[in-house]
Image: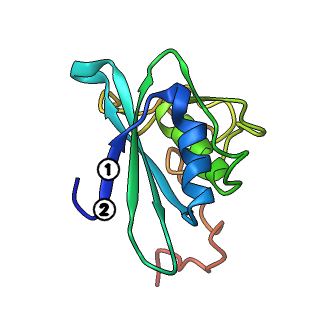
Amino acid sequence: MSGVAESRWVAPGHLVAAAEAAKDAGFFFESMTCVDRLDPHGVFELIYTFNRWDAPARVAYRVWAPRDGAVPTLSGVYGIAAWNEREAWELFGVAFAGHPNLTWLLLPEGTEFRPLLKSFTAPPPSIYDDSLTPPPPGADGREHADADG
């Protein structure tokens, strides 16, 4: 993995302890991202990155997250991780056990599709999509010229 000084695979059951060790060593939570590895592996790959201010040395923890299981939340160790976890839940469907607020962040509440899955094709029409019906004439606030000019 490029861009990091060290990359380690961590079992989901050891993720919180690994994050606590990183925090105790002076690392801050930088980011977490998700990669759809459902085909062919049947899992998601979560990549957590940590860094330091005093001696930059980015470290990556890589975790296989089962499709139908949950990964423990890191929000108890690094509060900011809650936002990245909500995004991964919403856009990929990854569950995070113990998350304090696993609710919709970007998409309308109750969305039934996961737009960042590789298998995603197109969402069904939405009540929030105003491109489906054009606005009536004059709704844009401009005066419209009549046919005579």
Residues 14 and 101: in front is 14
Dot 1: few (<14), some (14–19), or many (≥20) neighbours within 10 Å? some
- Against 23, residue 15 (above or below) is above
Q: Where is residue 85 in the image (x, y as percent from the top left)?
A: 59, 43
Please indicate, yes or no, whether residue 95 appears anywhere in the rendered image. Answer: yes
Name the disc covering residue 7, or none. Answer: 1
Please indicate, yes or no, whether residue 94 appears anywhere in the rendered image. Answer: no
Q: In which quarter of the image is residue 10?
A: top left
Label count reads 2
On screen, residue 21 versus residue 39, left or right, reads right
Q: Quadrant of residue 11?
A: top left
CA distance for labels 2 and 1: 7 Å
Q: Position of residue 41 (x, y in %)?
A: 26, 20
Q: Where is residue 52 in the image (x, y as percent from the top left)?
A: 50, 72
Q: Which element is circle 1 on? A: strand
- Against 53, residue 66 (above or below) is above
Q: Residue furthest bottom?
A: 149
Look at the numbered discs 2 and 1 and tell me whether their residues touch, using CB distance below 8 Å.
Answer: yes
Residue at image point 50% right, 15% down: 68
> Callout 2, which amino acid?
Val
Residues 136 and 100: in front is 100
Name the disc covering residue 77, or none. Answer: none
On screen, residue 59 versus residue 6, left or right, reads right
Residues 17 and 115: in front is 17
Colour logic: rainbow
Q: Quadrant of residue 43?
A: top left
Q: Residue furthest top?
A: 68
Q: Which element is circle 2 on? A: loop
Q: Which residue lies furthest to the right in this view?
A: 100
Location of mark 2 (residue): 4
> Callout 1, which amino acid?
Ser
Q: Where is residue 116 in the image (x, y as percent from the top left)?
A: 40, 39
